[in-house]
Image (tube, rainbow, N blue to C red):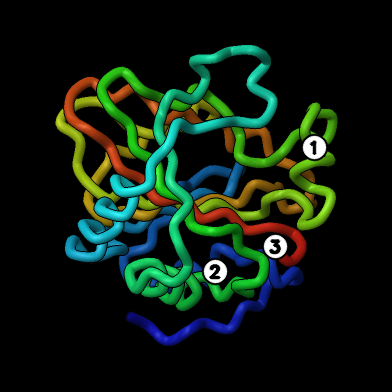
């Protein structure tokens, strides 16, 4: 694991592509529409296995803000991972070494489990300022800045993550990291980050997600 990288971003809840690209194997999607990167084998298989066990232990049905009444918008299961777990602490340390984002700005790590037929329909990770739950979710810590998502296993069929606007699809691979800035360079929310957790066709998909906020998380 590399030494923590100084974060040269203007906001301690953010990072920059230049910082992330210092990590061996990190790649940037060549698009002017958004800042989107991926890194194969970011996590070792043994850590992925430990995280899968934690997800299976405490999973529950996933929820979503502003689903517009679509009960099938997000059909996965979710698990909030305990910060005291050694596997969680290991992952948090690796993320900090990668992005340098002040840990106070991070939401708790969340795991997701998708069975056959389950998906997360096209969505963005930031909260819409005009959304019904914006004040509830953003009044204290502000909106989400960066998303870091890690696949924990390979899926026999389906389960890819598709960024429709830039026509980029990521297939699940053990330990692969995908991350993106939820804002444009001018600070406005970036709708080009719209992405679809596509249906699993065969097997089960496990994912870890880490979101960061504009202000410290409470």
Q: What residue is shown at x 69% (from left), y 25% (from top)?
A: 66
Residue hosting label 3: 217
Residue 130's quadrant in the figure?
top right
SS at badge 3: loop
Task: Give how far apart the Cα atoms at labels 1 and 2 are.
Answer: 31 Å
Q: Is label 1 or label 2 in front?
A: 1
Q: Which mark, by number, is residue 216?
A: none
Q: What residue is shown at x 41% (from left), y 48% (from top)?
A: 111
Q: Position of residue 99 (x, y in %)?
A: 52, 70
Q: Position of residue 7 (x, y in %)?
A: 62, 78
Residues tagged 3 and 1 counted as in contact (Cβ below 8 A):
no
Task: Give how far apart the Cα atoms at labels 3 and 1 are.
Answer: 15 Å
Above or below, 182 relative to 17: above
- Say whether disc 2 or disc 3 marks the residue closer to the N-terminus: 2
Residue hosting label 2: 18
Q: What residue is shown at x 61% (from left), y 34% (from top)?
A: 124
Task: Give how far apart the Cα atoms at labels 2 and 3 are.
Answer: 25 Å
Q: Position of residue 127 (x, y in %)?
A: 72, 38
On screen, residue 165 versus residue 128, left or right, reads left
The crowding category of the residue bearing disc 2, from other C-alpha atoms within 10 Å (few below 14, some 14 to 19, many at least 20), is few
Foreground: 123 or 19? 123
Residue 191's quadrant in the figure?
top right
Foreground: 65 or 158? 65
- Say whether disc 1 or disc 2 marks the residue closer to the N-terminus: 2
Residue hosting label 1: 134
Residues tagged 2 and 3 counted as in contact (Cβ below 8 A):
no
On screen, residue 203 versus residue 162, left or right, reads left
Above or below, 36 relative to 75: below
Foreground: 114 or 154? 114
Q: What residue is shown at x 39% (from left), y 67% (from top)?
A: 88
- Say whether disc 3 or disc 1 marks the residue closer to the N-terminus: 1
């Amino acid at each position: 694991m590399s030494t923590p990288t100084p974060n040269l971003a203007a906001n301690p809840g953010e990072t920059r592509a230049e910082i992330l690209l210092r990590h061996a194997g990190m790649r940037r999607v060549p698009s002017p529409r958004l800042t989107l990167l991926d890194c194969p084998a970011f996590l070792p298989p043994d850590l992925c296995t430990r995280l899968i066990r934690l997800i299976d232990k405490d999973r529950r049905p996933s929820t979503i803000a502003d689903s517009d009444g679509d009960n099938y918008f997000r059909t996965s299961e979710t698990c909030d991972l305990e910060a005291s777990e050694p596997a969680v602490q290991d992952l948090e340390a690796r993320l900090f070494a990668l992005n340098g984002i002040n840990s106070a700005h991070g939401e708790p790590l969340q795991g997701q489990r998708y069975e056959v037929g389950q998906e997360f329909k096209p969505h963005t990770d930031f909260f819409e300022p005009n959304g019904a739950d914006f004040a509830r979710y953003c009044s204290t810590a502000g909106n989400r800045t960066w998303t870091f998502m890690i696949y924990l296993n390979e899926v026999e069929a389906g389960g890819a993550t598709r960024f429709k606007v830039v026509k980029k699809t990521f297939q699940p691979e053990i330990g692969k990291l995908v991350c993106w800035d939820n804002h444009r360079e001018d600070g406005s929310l970036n709708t080009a980050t719209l992405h679809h957790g596509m249906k699993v066709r065969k097997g089960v998909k496990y994912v870890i997600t880490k979101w960061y906020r504009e202000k410290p998380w409470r």
